């Protein structure tokens, strides 16, 4: 996610890491960010699952790609997509 965020910075793409398990806490997430060089990736918590439910997220690690009209363009279930697959999806959404 961090790599995708860095590559598309300034190109009208927003990558957001959404934590639905607040018990894992901010400290755990910040450690993960440091390990994977998350930089200024946007991080949000959704302890009430409002965002997850609005976009039909059902699994931890699920990736949801939302288009300019705020509609789900595609989703990927865990174990998820490779970086190249995510990049291809984002490139298609930017066309």
Image (cartoon, grey):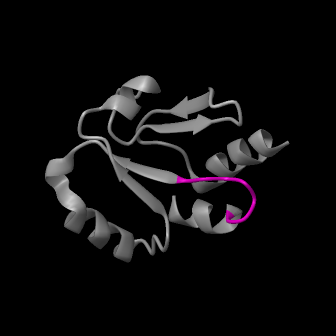
Relative to 31, 65 lies left or right: right
The foreground one among 85 and 57 is 57
Is residue 10 rendered magenta in the image? yes
Q: Tell me the quarter of the picture where residue 46 sits.
A: top left
Q: Tell me the quarter of the picture where residue 31 sits.
A: bottom left
Q: Position of residue 63 (x, y in %)?
A: 49, 40
Residue lying furthest left: 23
Relative to 91, 40 lies left or right: left
Q: Is residue 62 above or below residue 71?
A: below
Q: Position of residue 24 (x, y in %)?
A: 18, 54
Q: Is residue 14 above or below residue 21?
A: below
Q: Position of residue 14 (x, y in %)?
A: 60, 53
Residue ID at (51%, 58%): 1
Residue ID at (67%, 53%): 13
The span shown in magenta is: 9-15
Classify the position of the C terminus by image quarter.
top right
Q: Position of residue 75 (x, y in %)?
A: 54, 31
Is residue 56 at least partly visible in the picture?
no
Residue ID at (19%, 49%): 22
Q: Is residue 2 above or below residue 94?
A: below
Residue lying furthest right: 95
Q: Report the predominant secondary structure element of the magenta stretch.
A: loop
Is residue 44 rendered magenta in the image? no
């Amino acid at each position: 996610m961090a790599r995708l965020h860095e590559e598309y910075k300034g190109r009208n793409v927003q990558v957001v890491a959404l934590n639905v398990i607040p018990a894992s806490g901010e400290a755990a997430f910040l450690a993960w960010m440091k390990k994977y060089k998350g930089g200024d990736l946007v991080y949000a918590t959704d302890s009430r699952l409002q965002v997850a439910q609005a976009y039909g997220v059902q699994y931890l690690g699920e990736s949801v790609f939302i288009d300019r009209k705020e509609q789900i363009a595609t989703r990927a279930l865990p174990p998820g997509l490779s970086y190249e697959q995510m990049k291809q999806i984002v490139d298609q959404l930017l066309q």
